[in-house]
Amino acid sequence: MENFINMESSKGKILIVDDEQDIVEFIKYNLNKEGFETMSAYDGVEAVRNAKLFKPDLILLDMMMPIKDGMQAIRELRSNPDFDATVIIFLTAMSDEASEIKGLEAGADDYIAKPIKTELLLTRVKAALRRANTEKPAATDNDEEVIAFGDLEINRTKFTVYYKNEELVLAKKEFELLSLLASKPGRVFLRNEILNTVWGTDVIVGDRTIDVHIRKIRQKLNLDVITTVKGVGYKFEMPE
């Protein structure tokens, strides 16, 4: 198994997954030069195994790979609570809308299209890690921020959601979106406001990104609490 590049003052740990070795080496070179700690994998099976060993902050994941492709790998990773907060960015030559939606539904945080441009790659990686770091709560066990509506409890400190004492597993962006809407029940959040708050202003994502995440939240909660305000945005309302 490949040894990872270890740096004393690492800016973050990144797992690079692609079945093309030249692409892996190209990305690794540029990330190491920027001070990141890296490890690589060349198929989906190795990606999952190395992710458990390396515990990366971010995974660059190719979509088309042998043995286990990127979609299978991300689903396996997202089913493991250890990777709820891990940023996963797809590397793909597939630019069609259907593939992008499937990737978002599976838990991808972003897409980087091939051929990969160095400056864009570094900008997207740094932005993703910056957002992930600023979003981590800094409270103690005695200082938790909890939003409760009857049997629904959203713990914004622990990033957990419980309904009738059963934990519901939400992906990181799903939780952030639900938490935002629930923070002010009845208020309509504009689509641009949601995008800027949850995804940030330094990443370009389409309106369908919100729609995909809202649909997943509704499916997992199985509660009619998020209302679509057509052409405007969304609001959170608990049923009577």
Image (spheres, helix red, strand yellow):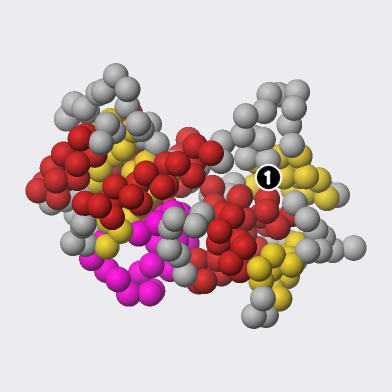
Q: Which residues are magenta?
A: 92-111
In screen coordinates, is 143 left or right of 121?
right
In screen coordinates, is 64 left or right of 90?
left
Residue 24 x, y percent position in the rendering: 16, 45
Residue 180 x, y percent position in the rendering: 68, 53
How many other residues sit within 10 Å of disc 1, few (<14), some (14-19) or many (≥20)?
many
Q: Which residue is mark 1?
A: 161
State the residue lying farthest toward the bottom.
Answer: 231
Q: Residue at x 50, y 71 (%)?
A: 208
State the residue lying farthest toward the right.
Answer: 240
- With respect to residue 1, does 190 lie above or below? below
Q: Residue at x 49, y 37 (%)?
A: 133
**Camera-side residue: 73 or 15?**
15
Residue kind at label 1, given as amino acid type: Val
In screen coordinates, is 194 left or right of 8?
right
Query: Residue 223 appears in which quarter of the rendering?
Result: bottom right
In this rendering, does residue 70 appear at all? no
Indicate whether residue 99 is drawn in magenta.
yes
- With respect to residue 122, does 187 lie above or below? below
Q: Residue at x 38, y 74 (%)?
A: 97
Q: Could you say whether the residue bearing mark 1 is in a helix, strand or loop?
A: strand
**On-image quarter of the C terminus:** bottom right
- With respect to residue 154, does 203 lie above or below? below
**On-image quarter of the N terminus:** top left
Residue 188 x, y percent position in the rendering: 74, 67
